[in-house]
Amino acid sequence: MQNDPRTNAPATSDAGIEPARDPDAAPGLPGRANYTQFAQRYAQMAPEKPHNALYERPATAALLGEVAGLDVLDAGCGPGIVSAELARAGARVHAFDVTPAMVELARSHCAGLPVEVAQGDLGQPFAWLAEGRFERIVCSLALDYVEHLAPTFAEFRRVARPGALLVFSMAHPMRDWIDTRTHGGRSYFETTRFGLHWAGFGEPKPYVEAYRRPLADIVNALTASGWAIEQLVEPQPRPEMKAVAPRLHAELAQAPAFLCVRARRLP
Ligand SMILES: C[S@@+](CC[C@H](N)C(=O)[O-])C[C@H]1O[C@@H](n2cnc3c(N)ncnc32)[C@H](O)[C@@H]1O
């Protein structure tokens, strides 16, 4: 059993360098199996969790900028934390997620706001969405569960208006490779599917599988799909994190756990 090193919690035991394989893990789509285990706990904890609230969300929001009056897609919306923030900032939001429990949580969290929530898979065509619908697309911490990124970026382009912005965040590929508990002895240049028991979301620890791939594969899939990169951010923790999570602050001030990208749809 391994703990997620990104949560700053010590491993309870060392399974060696091979990634853990949970016998109960569902084959196929990892994202839904992951979050079905702890959707409710994620919804309760992510709004305040330092990794999200004082690290990823501010970095992604800064890249996204003003959204008032815009049509925004929140892809892989989880329990709707970002969707609600966007709607309160004046956006009309369409959100989707592959995990039914997350869809329900997002609907409940965004009740009364201009947010519609659907169930959908980032790894399949977004057949229910018309082309050219959105001026902004945000995809926070969900692409790590998609094996092939190019078709997803192509779908983002199809549903985006000319000149639209795509902002996404995902695990930093070097961060996940450099840790012997996650690289599994494999080359940085391979795409690997690995699993970890995440600490930081209570008990029982959810077993979470994700894909890790080289940075060039992320960048090249994006640009080959009709997007131009405007900014790539390796975020710094917010200064307030120092008081509430000093170890995590020190770790993230030393090396990034995530990367955040803003890209513009080419004509
Ligand atoms: C770390 S959570 C992030 C949720 C939300 N974006 C946020 O920032 O709070 C990852 C989300 O991605 C969703 N997800 C995983 N694989 C997916 C897929 N193939 N299609 C759509 N959503 C997916 C999960 O269900 C989960 O809600």
Image (cartoon, rainbow, N blue to C red):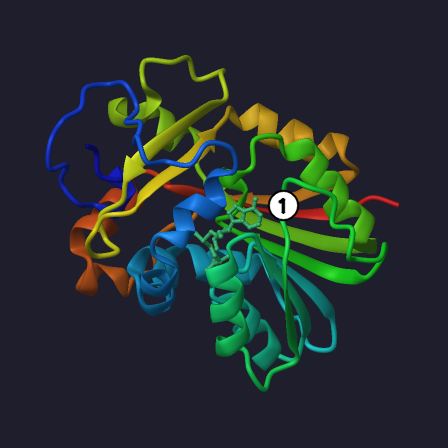
Relative to residue 243, is residue 142 depicted above or below?
above
In this view, the residue farthest toward the right is: 267
Q: Quadrant of residue 222?
A: top right
Q: Residue at x 36, y 65 (%)?
A: 40
The tally of labels here is 1
Judge from the rendering whether residue 256 lies leftward or rightward of residue 84; answer left or right: left
Residue extending furthest toward the bottom: 112
Q: Please tell me in which quadrant of the rendered image residue 184 appears.
A: top left
Q: Is residue 57 above or below residue 85?
A: above
Q: Nearer the viewer, residue 135 or 210?
A: 210
Is ligand 1 closer than 8 angstroms to the Cβ of mark 1?
yes
Horizontal arrangement in the rendering, residue 71 relative to residue 20 (left or right) = right
Res. 78 visible in picture: no
Residue 108 in picture, x, y percent from top left: 50, 77
Q: Is residue 130 above or below residue 189?
A: below
Q: Is residue 57 above or below residue 266?
A: below
Q: Position of residue 250 (x, y in %)?
A: 22, 47
Residue under the point 36% across and 63% down: 46
Give the quarter of the image for residue 103: bottom right
Tell me the kind of residue under disc 1: Leu
Instruction: Decide which of 45, 204 is in the foreground and name it.
Output: 204
- Confirm whether residue 241 shows in the render: yes
Image quarter where the N terminus lies is: top left
User: Around disc 1, counting alpha carbons within 10 Å, would you say few (fewer than 14), some (14 to 19), or many (20 or more)?
Assistant: many
The residue pinned by badge 1 equals 122
| Residue drawn 62% across the image and 52% down it | 167
* Residue 224 falls left or right of residue 243: right
Q: Residue at x 30, y 45 (%)?
A: 252
Say what secondary structure mark 1 lies in.
loop
Position of residue 102 measured from the top left corner of the image (x, y, whole percent):
48, 62
Which is nearer the eye, 40 or 258? 40
